[in-house]
Image (spheres, helix red, strand yellow):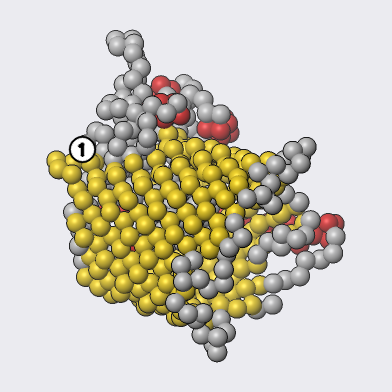
Amino acid sequence: MTLFRSFLLALLLAFVFQPVCGQAQKIKLDYSVEANIIAGDGEYTPFYLMNNRGGTVSFTPNTGYLRAAVIQDIDTTRRFSYGFGLDAMISYNDDIPGYVQQAYVELRFLALGLMVGSKEEYSLLWDKALSSGGWVWSGNSRPIPQVRAGIPEFVNVPWTHGTVQIKGEIAYGRFVDDKYQYRTRGISQNYTRGLLYHRKNLMLRFGKTSKKFYGIVGIDMAAQFGGKTYRNNTLVCDFPNNIMQYFKVFVPLAGGEDSPGIDQVNVTGNHLGSYLFAVGTRQKSWEGRIYHEHPFDDHSGMIFRNKFDGLWGIEYRSKEAYPVVGGVVVEFLETRDQSGPFLWDQNQQIPIQVSAGDWYYGHAVYNGWVHRGHTIGNPLVLSPGYNGDGYLGFKSSRVEALHVGIDGYITREFDYRFLASLQRGWGNPYVPYIQVEKGFSGLLEVHYAPKALQGWRFGLSVAADAGTLVGNNWAVQMGVRKSGRLF
């Protein structure tokens, strides 16, 4: 109910203040209705029928859903604009039969933006359809209700004559998987209630938009903080939720005397982040770039002691209409170094600090960078939903993976997408696998959007997994979607 109250209040403010900023914005309300069914065999839904889909598809095989949404997009041509969305789902063979996927309001004044509510997000820079996903946020999990403010799109930095553009945002929110953790936890496993969310990012792009070449550097940081962690219904850690904690995760700073020991020795909350680098070119008929996203979990990663860990990629995107090959992405993910084999926080007995054993996405008290069982970041670091034993944390964070994505058009009415990944897993720094686990995941999907049936889109997908990481799974997905404009 709190989310809906915030949604309605922000929507009311948008209408109240709109006349002050000029001529009234026209309502352009888009709708979509969608039905999907997935049928096959295996312990899990195939990897690419479930991952990077906003947490809407269940781990459980043989599933399906109905989805309906209404969206008012921001009008970027206006000084002041507003947008909003409401997106609801009914699921079959999922852990929850129905839920609201998105409910949000957006306000935009010049370059400044504000979003209140729960809205799907994807990688900051990488290709939404073809990339394996960003390190901090990929669109793999359900959205987190939050308040987000900043500069959501690149704008020119004053006095640089258009040679430098900037974008960046700050957000605070709350995880909404308390009941999920309680229901799915194993005996003697940690679960958390009231966990809070923080994220901040800043990107700089160099090169005029009219020029052929450009470069991007940026930083993306996030944190979990607050809440209460339990084991066997017994309180393990009571993290303070007062206003000072919001400041301490922003800076970040160590916890005070009212914080558990782990926050006093380190910093408040569970922090992670990445540096982003890209060099690109804009040609007449195509665009391309090479990029690297370098992860860090603490200071050691921030000064590159984790060496070549991260996501390395190359991307091509055609500008032609209905190209046979519209886009190609090839990525390599490496997370094996993690700054070294182990972590030691200095104390009076052994006054030596060893900042290694980073355990990407993991945490000693929280379950880590996960929401409702899905990895929030890159899903090639396997989601805890695959664990199968009630452990809600990350078992496989030391991985090596090669990923390929291709899309395009067969005809003007038929488009396709192909995804494939090969990966190996070594477990995590503290509980390694006895032997190296291997896996392959692939997807081929085709969509048909007939001109004679305006707004209709039919889909057929085939996906399979093989190996020891997520097992041997296969399935076929059939779907239909109708979209259009109500007003």
Tell which of 280 and 283 is nearer to you. Answer: 283
Left or right: 46 as drawn, with respect to 115: left
Residue name at image x 56 percent, y 39 percent = 217
Left or right: 193 as drawn, with respect to 162: left
Assign the N terminus to one quadrant of the image: bottom right
Q: Total number of numbered labels?
A: 1
| Image position, residue 9 (x, y; %) | 68, 57
| Image position, residue 251 (x, y; %) | 56, 29
Q: Residues within 10 Å of mark 1 (few under 14, many from 20)?
A: some
Q: Residue furthest bottom?
A: 452
Residue name at image x 49 percent, y 66 percent = 326
Tell which of 268 and 315 is nearer to you. Answer: 315
Task: Say whether residue 418 is visible.
Answer: yes
Q: Residue furthest left?
A: 434
Q: Is residue 326 above or below residue 389?
A: below
Residue name at image x 24 percent, y 33 percent = 430
Q: Quadrant of residue 336?
A: top left
Determine the secondary structure under disc 1.
Answer: strand
The residue labelled by disc 1 is 432
| Image position, residue 88 (x, y; %) | 50, 68
Q: Type of residue at label 1?
A: Pro
| Image position, residue 129 (x, y; %) | 46, 61
Tell which of 289 and 146 is nearer to you. Answer: 289
Left or right: 294 as drawn, with respect to 31: left
Residue name at image x 61 percent, y 60 percent = 284
